[in-house]
Image: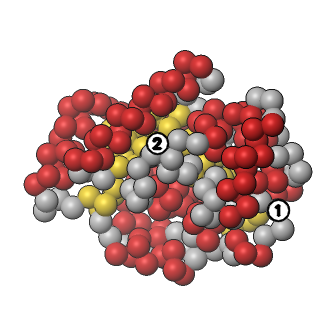
């Protein structure tokens, strides 16, 4: 049975997609069978996995509205080393199309149930907003991984996201919980980063992952080459950190 984790943050620009593709690639390098679900209409996780979103005939959009199934829509991202349920701009129309469906919040969950035995980990890259797509991502998941920068506004966004997760847990998915907070784009030279990091550890304890992802130019360059940073430059500090994070995720999944 696959462990399904949604990578979510209602704040944009926090390294959510970078975390999704690099965690997927890191887990694959550790011998795990991985499916990455791109649930963001921008399709950045698709392009960052080496798949051209402009050439796709079917995407997660067709899966959500019942015109295709997860198995036949999934593609093999060879360079990245994992399977991908891709997305493109068509997905933006799902918000309107899903309104007419009964149990529209669980369309992704139902679709993933058909491929559950084929993977060890399913990672869902959720859009940076509280939308019907995000609700689908949260309803399908066993847990949420929250990437966040150690800055003041990130703390405000975190409280909003935690409140949303509690509502989904109470009303739609009683299995849902916060798996952990991942500190990304971390610069230890900045006093504010250190202060916010300490606050997170104080308030959330062991919910804060031990691994810290440093600010790293090679991770930022990798998407332009259609590769996760873990594959693009395995020797970089960022890639090594995501591999370490992958090992920590395997460890946490065992205790679930």
On residue 209, the disc is none
- The residue closer to the viewer here, 187 or 130, is 130
Select label 2 or label 1 by which is in front: 1
Dividing the picture into quadrants, the one containing residue 207 is: top left
Residue found at x 55% / y 74%: 227
> Where residue 86 sits in the image (x, y, percent)?
70, 61
- Image marks 2 and 1: residues in contact by CB distance under 8 Å: no
Q: Residue at x 51, y 74 (%)?
A: 223
Q: Which comes sooner in the sequence, label 2 or label 1?
A: 1
Separation of disc 2 and disc 1 at Cα?
Answer: 27 Å
Above or below, comparing residue 74 to residue 69 in the picture = below
Residue 94 visible in this rendered orientation of the protein: yes
Secondary element under disc 2, as helix, strand or loop, is strand
Q: Which residue is mark 2?
A: 145
Check the picture and name the quadrant holding the N terminus. Answer: top right
- In the rendered structure, the answer to whether residue 13 lies left or right of residue 63 reads left
Looking at the rendered structure, the secondary structure element under dot 1 is: loop
Give the residue drawn at x 67%, y 56%. Answer: 92
Residue 160 vertical position relative to residue 7 in the rendered view, above or below: above
Q: Name, please, the residue furthest toward the left.
A: 191
Marking on residue 58:
1
Tag count: 2
Q: Residues within 10 Å of mark 2 (few under 14, many from 20)?
A: many
Identify the residue at image location x=31%, y=60%. Answer: 185
Locate residue 59, reporting x and y percent.
Answer: 77, 59
């Amino acid at each position: 049975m696959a462990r399904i984790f949604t990578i979510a943050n209602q704040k944009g620009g926090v390294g959510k997609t970078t975390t999704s593709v690099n965690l997927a690639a890191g887990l694959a390098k550790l011998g795990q069978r991985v499916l990455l679900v791109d649930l963001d209409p921008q399709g950045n996780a698709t392009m960052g996995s080496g798949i051209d979103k402009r050439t796709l005939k079917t995407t997660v959009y067709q899966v959500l509205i019942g015109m295709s199934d997860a198995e036949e829509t999934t593609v093999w991202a060879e360079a990245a080393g994992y399977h991908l349920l891709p997305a493109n701009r068509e997905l933006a129309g799902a918000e309107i199309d899903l309104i007419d469906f009964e149990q529209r919040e669980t369309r992704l969950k139902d679709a993933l149930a058909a491929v559950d035995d084929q993977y060890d980990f399913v990672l869902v890259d959720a859009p940076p907003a509280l939308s019907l797509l995000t609700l689908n991502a949260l309803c399908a998941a066993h847990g949420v991984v929250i990437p966040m920068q150690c800055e003041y506004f990130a703390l405000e966004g975190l409280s909003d996201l935690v409140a949303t997760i509690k509502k989904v847990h109470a009303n739609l998915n009683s299995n849902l919980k916060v798996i952990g907070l991942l500190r990304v784009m971390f610069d230890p030279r900045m006093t504010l980063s250190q202060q916010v990091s300490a606050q997170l550890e104080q308030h959330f304890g062991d919910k804060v992952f031990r691994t810290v992802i440093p600010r790293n130019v090679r991770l930022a360059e990798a998407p332009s080459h259609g590769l996760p940073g873990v594959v693009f430059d395995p020797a970089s500090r960022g890639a090594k950190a995501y591999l370490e994070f992958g090992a920590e995720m395997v460890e946490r999944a065992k205790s679930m």
